[in-house]
Image: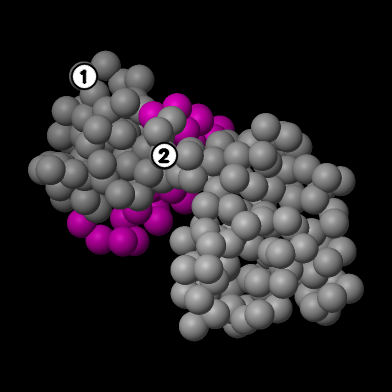
């Protein structure tokens, strides 16, 4: 059903699938399709999405198929458009820029580091590690110290594969302390517990 849709409807589906929240305002700001979100009507008639207060995929697998059937360049273009539309949401913007990046990109790495700081400040240590891991892929030399600390102090050799399995303990707090990040006492307690 997806392949039979008009090109502009498929483009909007890719945007919606990668945006994930279904926010009509973000999608409208990100699209270059003439007619905007209204061009999703064929996808709605095909039973793939519903468009009301937001865009909702009828089944999670539809989102997966939409992304899987798009090309890498279509996904990168959608991520770039979403990053522009999310200018006032720096963490989401950073992740979309990272997904759009083809090779090393220092400015995106900085935005991801900022996203990592914000994640840690609200008590999301695994999210911070994920952001730093992706940042290190974009600037391996500058963030090599992050991996050196992980390996020498904590025995972690592949943090990208392991960050989801980490226990949020004093070791994680020590790691982030060595990176000279400030954690408020309120969040320090929420991370430890």
Above/below status of 151 relative to 40 = below
**Residue 165 shows up from this direction:** no
Residue drawn at x 54%, y 80% is 192
Magenta stretch: residue 38 in it? Answer: no
Q: Which residue is mark 2?
A: 89
Above/below status of 56 relative to 103 = below
Residue drawn at x 17%, y 28% is 38
Q: Is residue 113 left or right of residue 21?
A: right
Neighbour tally class for label 1: few under 14, some 14-19, many 20 plus, Cα within 10 Å: few
Where residue 58 appears, as percent x and y from the top left, is 20, 56
> Could you give the CA–CA distance between mark 1 and mark 2, rounded to whole angstroms?
25 Å
Q: Which residue is mark 1?
A: 35
Q: Is residue 136 left or right of residue 49?
A: right
Magenta residue span: 58-85
Residue drawn at x 77%, y 63% is 178
Q: Secondary structure at mark 2?
A: loop
Q: Nearer the viewer, residue 130 or 186?
A: 186
Q: Nearer the viewer, residue 1 or 59?
A: 59
Above/below status of 158 relative to 82 = below
Q: Secondary structure at mark 1?
A: loop
Where residue 110 appears, as percent x and y from the top left, is 66, 39
Residue drawn at x 47%, y 61% is 122
Where residue 10 appears, as percent x and y from the top left, is 33, 35
**Residue 118 shows up from this direction:** yes
Magenta stretch: residue 70 in it? Answer: yes
């Amino acid at each position: 059903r997806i392949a039979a849709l008009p090109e502009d409807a498929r483009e909007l589906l890719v945007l919606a699938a990668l945006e994930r929240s279904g926010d009509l305002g973000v999608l409208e700001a990100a699209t270059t399709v003439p007619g905007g979100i209204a061009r999703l009507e064929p996808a709605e008639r095909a039973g793939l999405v519903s468009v009301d207060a937001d865009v909702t995929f009828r089944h999670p697998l539809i989102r997966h198929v939409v992304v899987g059937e798009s090309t890498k360049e279509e996904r990168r273009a959608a991520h770039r458009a979403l990053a522009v539309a999310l200018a006032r949401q720096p963490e989401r913007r950073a992740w979309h820029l990272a997904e759009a990046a083809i090779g090393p990109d220092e400015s995106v790495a900085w935005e991801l580091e900022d996203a990592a700081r914000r994640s840690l400040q609200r008590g999301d240590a695994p999210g911070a590690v994920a952001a730093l891991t992706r940042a290190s892929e974009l600037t391996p030399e500058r963030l090599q110290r992050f991996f050196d600390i992980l390996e020498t102090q904590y025995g972690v050799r592949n943090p990208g594969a392991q960050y989801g399995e980490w226990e949020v303990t004093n070791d994680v707090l020590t790691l982030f302390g060595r990176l000279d990040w400030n954690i408020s006492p309120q969040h320090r307690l929420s991370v430890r517990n």
